[in-house]
């Protein structure tokens, strides 16, 4: 379908939806929405159900789900994050009733179709759907009025350019490199677009004099040192026209304790040992499988399997 056909179809669908007598808000237009794809197993706690599947097989699993389809599943690790997204949507609709710039949350699952009834009933019970991430080892008390998102820097918001230098040449060369190229913006990383989307929504609150009460807050949590390599990071964000609410430079210190204080709904990092440290202290974390960091663990090269001759 071409753009004109898509636009016409959307207008027609919107007209039908607007004429329906319902108090439920219309869905956001995908073209303008920030789409968050989430999995059923992280939105809901399905550990018991998964055990039935593994030990007794698919048929017993489906039978169990059908038998209990009117009983809502328990909230999973992604639940607070998605709930916070819906709170932001609610605030945006108050300020901009006709706006299509919202979070559009899509539930993804590979479950048997017959299990769909219980998933739908559970979604309707809570009123939300979810996202894919690691379960924390303990639970922190998260804000129910503000969405907090924390990002690592290199290989997450930014490219792994500087990370490559650290891994291949050491910290001294890295510090020299960052000083030399302090005024050259870093290339964008895989989640720059998400920070950009969050910033765009934040500005919608700012223009309504809602900066202090904005329901979105962003954090940069990086192992960089502010004194030796922080300037390039901040200048890069400035060159992109993006703001970060709090930039935290840990100079190599563990991220887990600080994240426990911040209590974000989700923390993105490219290195699994940071993810592990965060989730041990209750932070819901998501691994970004990008960059040279995937070949290392705690700065040590992961042994690669020998190739067959």
Image: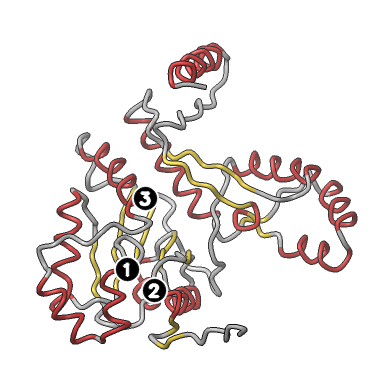
Indicate how the structure is coloured in the image.
Answer: secondary structure
Distance of label 1 from label 2 (alpha carbons):
7 Å
Residue picked out by circle 3: 194
Q: Secondary structure at mark 3?
A: helix
Above or below: residue 96 compared with residue 240? above
Q: Secondary structure at mark 2?
A: helix
The percent coordinates of residue 149 (x first, y second) are 37, 57
The percent coordinates of residue 198 (x first, y second) are 33, 47
Q: Nearer the viewer, residue 224 or 189?
A: 189
Q: Quadrant of residue 245?
A: bottom left
- Residue at the spot 79% in from the left edge and 66% down from the top edge: 51
Q: Are marks 1 and 2 in contact (CB under 8 Å)?
A: yes
Mark 2, other Cα within 10 Å: few <14 / some 14–19 / many ≥20:
some
Locate the C terminus and report the quarter of the image it occupies.
Answer: bottom right
N-terminal of the two: label 1 or label 3? 1
> Is 140 on the left-hand or right-hand side of 120?
left
Residue picked out by circle 2: 292
The percent coordinates of residue 141 (x first, y second) are 46, 64
Q: Secondary structure at mark 1?
A: loop
Residue picked out by circle 1: 160
Above or below: residue 110 compared with residue 286? above
Q: Nearer the viewer, residue 45 or 268?
A: 268
Distance of label 1 from label 3 (alpha carbons):
17 Å
């Amino acid at each position: 379908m071409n753009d004109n056909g898509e636009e016409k179809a959307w207008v027609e669908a919107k007209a039908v939806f607007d004429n329906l007598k319902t108090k439920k808000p219309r869905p956001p237009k995908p073209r303008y929405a920030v789409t968050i794809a989430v999995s059923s197993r992280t939105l809901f706690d399905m550990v018991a159900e998964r055990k039935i599947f593994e030990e007794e097989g698919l048929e017993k699993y489906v039978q169990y789900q059908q038998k209990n389809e009117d009983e809502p599943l328990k909230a999973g690790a992604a639940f607070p994050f998605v709930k916070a997204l819906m709170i932001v949507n609610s605030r945006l609709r108050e300020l901009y009733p006709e706006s299509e710039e919202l979070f559009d949350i899509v539930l993804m699952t590979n479950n048997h179709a017959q299990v769909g009834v219980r998933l739908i009933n559970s979604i309707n019970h809570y009123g939300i759907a979810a996202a894919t991430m690691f379960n924390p080892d303990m639970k922190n008390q998260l804000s129910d009025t503000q969405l907090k998102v924390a990002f690592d820097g290199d290989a997450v918001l930014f490219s792994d350019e500087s990370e490559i230098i650290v891994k291949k040449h050491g910290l001294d060369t890295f510090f020299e490199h960052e000083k030399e190229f302090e005024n050259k913006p870093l290339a964008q990383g895989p989640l720059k677009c998400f920070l950009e989307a969050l910033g765009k929504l934040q500005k919608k609150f700012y223009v309504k004099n809602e900066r202090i009460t904005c329901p979105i807050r962003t954090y940069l949590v990086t192992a960089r040192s502010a004194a030796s390599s922080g300037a390039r990071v901040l200048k890069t964000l400035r060159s992109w026209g993006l703001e970060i609410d709090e930039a935290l430079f840990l100079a190599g210190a563990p991220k887990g304790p600080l994240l426990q204080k911040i209590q974000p709904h989700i923390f993105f990092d490219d290195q699994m040992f940071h993810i592990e440290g965060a989730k041990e202290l209750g932070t819901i974390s998501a691994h970004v499988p990008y960059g040279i960091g995937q070949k290392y663990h705690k700065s040590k090269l992961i042994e690669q399997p020998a190739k067959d001759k």
